[in-house]
Amino acid sequence: MSRRIVIVGAGPGGLASAMLLAKTGADVTVVERLDRIGGRSSTIEAEGGYRFDMGPTFFLYPRVLKDIFAACGKDLDREVDLIRLDPQYHLVFESGGELKASGNPATMAEQVAKLCPADAANLPRFMADNRRKLAAFRPVLEKAFSSALDLLDPALLKSLPLMRPHQSVDADLGRYFSDPRVRLAFSFQSKYLGMSPFRCPSLFTILSFMEYEFGVFHPRGGTGAVMAAMARAATDMGVRIRLSEPVEEILFEGRKAVGVRTPAGEYKADALVLNSDFAQTMSRLVPNHLRRRWTDEKIERKKFSCSTFMLYLGIEGELPDLAHHTIYLTKDYARNIKEIEDGLELPAEPSFYVQNACVTDPELAPRGHSTLYVLVPVAHRTGGIDWQREKARYRSLVLKRLERIGLTDIEKRIRYEKILTPEGWENDMQIYRGATFNLAHSLDQMLHLRPRNRFEDLEGVYLVGGGTHPGSGLPVIFESARITSRLMADQLGLSHDWEAGTRMAAGQTALIEERAS
């Protein structure tokens, strides 16, 4: 008899796990609370013909997902049109200056030189050092960390001199770039993890490096098109995906999970994969007495990422002069970060991000119209901010801030609008504290100190997604699916023919290692 596996959540990690586990011959069922696949990476299908990514809009480092598709006999490039952007994004500094980031080294050097010629000269050294850093740390990102003993792994020990673990991203960048605007250009990516560049461990300078080394892509149709391709691949392989079926109870025999109950009935399982928000799932669906390391009390004391205030706007008219991705960085960035971390008040002069996807992909809006996706980092739900009272005021403030990038007449052109606050992330999307990027990636919450891929508090329960190792962001979420699926297959006696870390950089790996040497 084939092993029965139930996956809770049809987000990117759940869908990738479904593909890989189906490849082993397991009987796989995915149950999803929402009426659509993708979770935080789903598509908002709005009235009037507008379509928005709900969450991630930067599609980075597609090689991991390409490997997963290849392991399942599929070709991601045939399923999704990945458009490489150049410029990758437009950075606008409130303190003065701008930078149109490019994956072309010569063009990027010209852009940096406009801000600081000396910093432009250091770009090759930054890229070379981070090439070595990624090559050294890549094996660590591809394996499970099940205990402190795994810290003795030779690959990890070898990578430590390059990691500078007690230095922040900003401090590490100071070794290359003296202009604070240039450092911001290479550190705002820590927001992908929901963290401050002044606190985020220096390992994560590899985030900006990977953008320039491998490119920033727009999937035609949005990130949701990638989720749809994964769902098609999974169902082609026999996976059943049940939408609009929230899990009401996880079924246990002692400490062992044996299935789930939804409004449609019970699904029995030999093992369970949780792709739902980790902290929210634990506090709602797993009795506290069954947990030892991750009790409600201990989860409450953990550090969580920031949240976001979102505007999804359907706009009459086209916006050809606005870049696909625009990041506006406030003059006092350190103060902005402190306001977010303290969570006592909303930033009065926030940084923000705008996606104008229709400049690349016009079919995301009706002819002659545009979609604007506006994201403002704010505090997660700590109780200090009343979003029922603040929502309308903050909407007005954000629309006023958009004038800084030339969007001076947007409000009167809005034909569709959706607002999502941290309260909405928490209640509507079932995310603990509305912390959009999961548990923070501080040193005391990484590797074996994160909830483990084979969850240590329960039997028969495995985790995928941003709440487990390696962490947040689509590439590493896909890697978490590969790690978790391999652990589960080994535990259940299922054969799998994908390698441990099927070349996380695949065709690029040899190139990285050659350049690093």
Image (cartoon, rainbow, N blue to C red):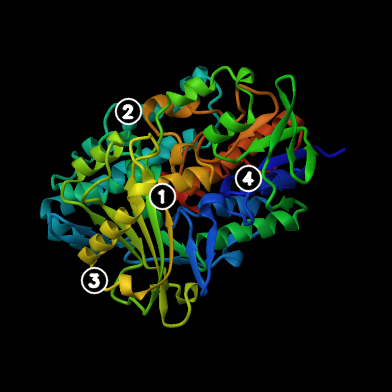
Name of the residue lying farthest toward the front? 389
Inter-mark Cα distance, 2 to 3? 44 Å
Residue 52 visible somewhere in the drawing = yes
Give yes or no for contact between labels 2 and 1 (Cβ–Cβ under 8 Å).
no
Write down the quadrant of residue 205 in the picture.
top left
Which three-letter amino acid code belongs to the residue tagged 1? Thr
Q: Which residue is mark 2?
A: 165
Residue at point 26% right, 30% down? 167
Give the label on residue 408, or none. 3
Inter-mark Cα distance, 2 to 1? 33 Å
Which three-letter amino acid code belongs to the residue tagged 4? Gly
Residue 253, how many percent across, how many down? Answer: 76, 23
Residue 208 visible somewhere in the drawing = no
Q: Earlier in the sequence, mark 2 or mark 3?
A: 2
Looking at the rendered image, the disc whose residue lies closer to the viewer, 4 or 1, is 1
Residue at point 40% right, 24% down? 444
Give the label on residue 466, or none. none
Looking at the rendered image, the disc whose residue lies closer to the viewer, 4 or 3, is 3
Q: Which residue is mark 4?
A: 9
